[in-house]
Amino acid sequence: MFSYVLRRLAATIPVMVIVAVLVFLMLRLTPSDPAAIIAGDNANAEQVAEIRKRLGLDQPILTQFVIWSSKTLQGDLGESFFFKKQVAELILDRLEPTLSLAFFTILLAVLIAIPLGVLAAYRHGSWLDRIVMGFSVLGFSVPVFVIGYALIYVFAIELNWLPVQGYQRLAQGFGGWLQRLILPSVTLSVIYVALIARITRTSVLEVMNEDYIRTARAKGQTERKVLVRHALANAAVPIVTVIGLGVALLIGGVVVTESVYTIPGLGRLTVDAVLARDYPTIQAVILLFSLTYVLINLLVDVTYTFFDPRIRY
């Protein structure tokens, strides 16, 4: 197991190198100029050239890449063009809202979707099964921002139960932190509930006619134990896969949700950095998202071995 994890970690190195090169080149080859954005509309050519020189954008692309990559390997992510702060400091400051939103979203999705999927498989063809399948289709069809604005209108504006926008840090109080996370987490979890419930239903349904299910029932075990210990346990590999995929897809969903609810997280930081053509911030955030994606895939692969020991060999 240890050697397997080491091999997978080693395989992430070329992936991260390719991501770094692609992100760097894509930003540098775009027609927009961050120096012109920083200088403003009334700046002349000399002022823009001076800013480009100060930011190091007047050097050849290869030289810029070597300087940036060498600093990144040393842990120096550079200084933000737009925010005038160290990029590492910006990321650390925005990390808590994004992690809180992602954790609460996945927690909600798993706690709701897996029981729904198991019940839908157990009640195959019933009204409950049809409702779950209908919800799955609806969850995939409606964009995240539409769900967000609809929930804001109903629960924040009309009923006045929850705050409209913003974020309160956990250190300032658990109640306020939780209250601010409910709407964005529910908004973001809808699509993941639909995805996980659908896959759970399909996976459990496939194993319900297996011999070990009939054997467990013949031994007199309760339906609850049959569903949880035998059906769900043996259908866990595809469910874990889709949960891992959902965590990875949160990267895109967080950007939209944080913008709708004005949450000062990494998603909002990414939007602001793209609009300002803030190269150091964009590069660092995308590298962080890519590394997170790779590590989640590694964690999912390791988790497989607990549900199916044959994968270890």
Image (cartoon, grey):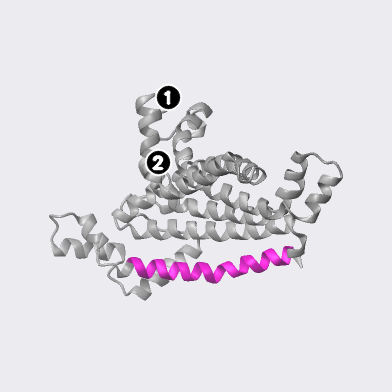
Residue 227 image position (x, y, % from top left):
73, 44
Would residue 113 be found to the left or right of residue 287 on screen?
A: right
Label 2, label 1: how many angstroms apart (C-alpha)? 17 Å
> In the image, is residue 197 above or below residue 5?
above
Q: What is the number of callouts on the image?
A: 2
Q: Amino acid at mark 1?
A: Trp
> In the image, is residue 279 above or below residue 228?
below
Residue range in magenta is 1-27
Residue 4: in magenta span? yes
Q: Secondary structure at mark 2?
A: helix
Confirm whether residue 56 shows in the render. yes
Q: What residue is pinned by disc 1?
A: 161
Q: Which mark is residue 147?
A: 2
Q: Residues within 10 Å of mark 1 (few under 14, many from 20)?
A: few
Tell me the mark number nearer the camera, choosing from 2 and 1: 2
- Which residue lies at the image location 63% right of the left edge and 56% below the top edge? 238
Judged by its main secondary structure, the magenta piece is: helix
Q: Quick one: quadrant of the C terminus?
A: bottom right
Q: Amino acid at mark 2?
A: Ile
Question: Which badge, 2 or 1, comes first in the chain's sequence?
Answer: 2
**Image quarter for residue 158?**
top left
Q: Residues within 10 Å of mark 2 (few under 14, many from 20)?
A: many
Would residue 287 be found to the left or right of residue 125 on screen?
A: left
Q: Quick one: quadrant of the N terminus?
A: bottom right
> In the image, is residue 269 above or below residue 44?
above
Residue 256 image position (x, y, % from top left):
39, 47
Confirm whether residue 89 shows in the render. no
**Image quarter for residue 65?**
bottom left
Q: Are marks 2 and 1 in contact (CB under 8 Å)?
A: no
Which one is nearer the viewer's eye here, 38 or 235?
Answer: 235
